Image: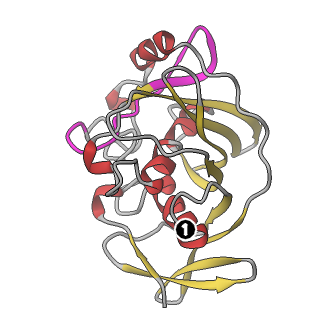
Amino acid sequence: MPQIYIPKRFNGPPGSGNGGYCAGAMAVALLGEGSGETAEVFLRAPPPLETELEIVPAGTGCECRHEGALVMTAGPGREMAPAPAAPPIAIAREAHKHFPPAEDHAFPGCFVCGPDRLDDGLCLFTGHIDGFDGVLDVWTPAADLAGDDGLVKDEILWSALDCPGAFAVGFQENPMVLGRIMGRILRRPPAGEELIVAGWSLFHEGRKHGAGTALYTADGELLAQTEQLWIELK
């Protein structure tokens, strides 16, 4: 039976996997590496770290289970609304200055956005800035995040597309977790290339918040995008 394994490096909230990384692993299990197709992943429970998670077929998609309990589901996604045009990279380079202070971060050890992960995290510190209706940062993927082909792994791209959505819809004021993410990778970039990461708000409905995120090259080519549902913690 197929399995996925979430190393402890790729955590989100303490003791569980980063939602984007885990969703990316599910997308790869469903579609294969670099498929270019859209996948939709629902996170039903905190994905455990450092343990084998079973993948079982379910309709047109698959389920991820741990000791019989449902953790995630994945299936084909629908067409997403077009992403906004990429902002100038000069604006994106300045946005991190508006990232919330480290002492206000609910999950400072998060692999993607945690200020405590300067050595081995993605260090995506997306902030609001004039010139873009959302949050931005720049990101240069390290070599250890790429596959044997030198291109950044799908799971890492899904990770980079995760947390910016939360900060676009108010994570700093109301900590929240990822409930659903639909994404598509159009082209995997090589490690070492400077990229623009963006997130923007889609809707607010009580404790539920919708966000979009995208990854662009420095000259504005869209590489990947997602639509997300975030749920505030009680």
Helix, strand or loop at label 1? It is loop
In depth, the one of 60 and 112 nearer the eye is 60
Kindly give the residue lying farthest to the front in the view shown.
149
Image-quadrant location for residue 179: bottom right
Tally of numbered tags: 1
| Residue 193 image offset from top left, x and y in percent | 37, 31
Q: Is residue 21 left or right of residue 187?
A: left
The answer to if 159 sits in the magenta stretch is no
Image-quadrant location for residue 26: bottom right
| Image point (58%, 23%), residue name | 220
The colour scheme used to paint the residues is: secondary structure
| Image point (59%, 16%), residue name | 87
| Image point (60%, 71%), residue name | 30
Around disc 1, counting alpha carbons within 10 Å, would you say few (fewer than 14), some (14 to 19), or many (20 or more)? Answer: few
In depth, the one of 223 and 108 nearer the eye is 223
Above or below, 196 against 165 in this view is above
Q: In this view, does 77 lie to the left or right of 187?
A: right
Q: In this view, does 177 lie to the left or right of 114?
A: right
Image-quadrant location for residue 143: top left
Label 1 sits on residue: 32
The answer to if 128 sits in the magenta stretch is yes
Of the residues shown, which amino acid type is indicated by label 1? Gly
| Image point (54%, 72%), residue name | 29
In depth, the one of 227 and 102 nearer the eye is 227
- The magenta span reads 118-137
| Residue 169 image offset from top left, x and y in percent | 63, 33
Above or below, 51 against 7 in this view is below
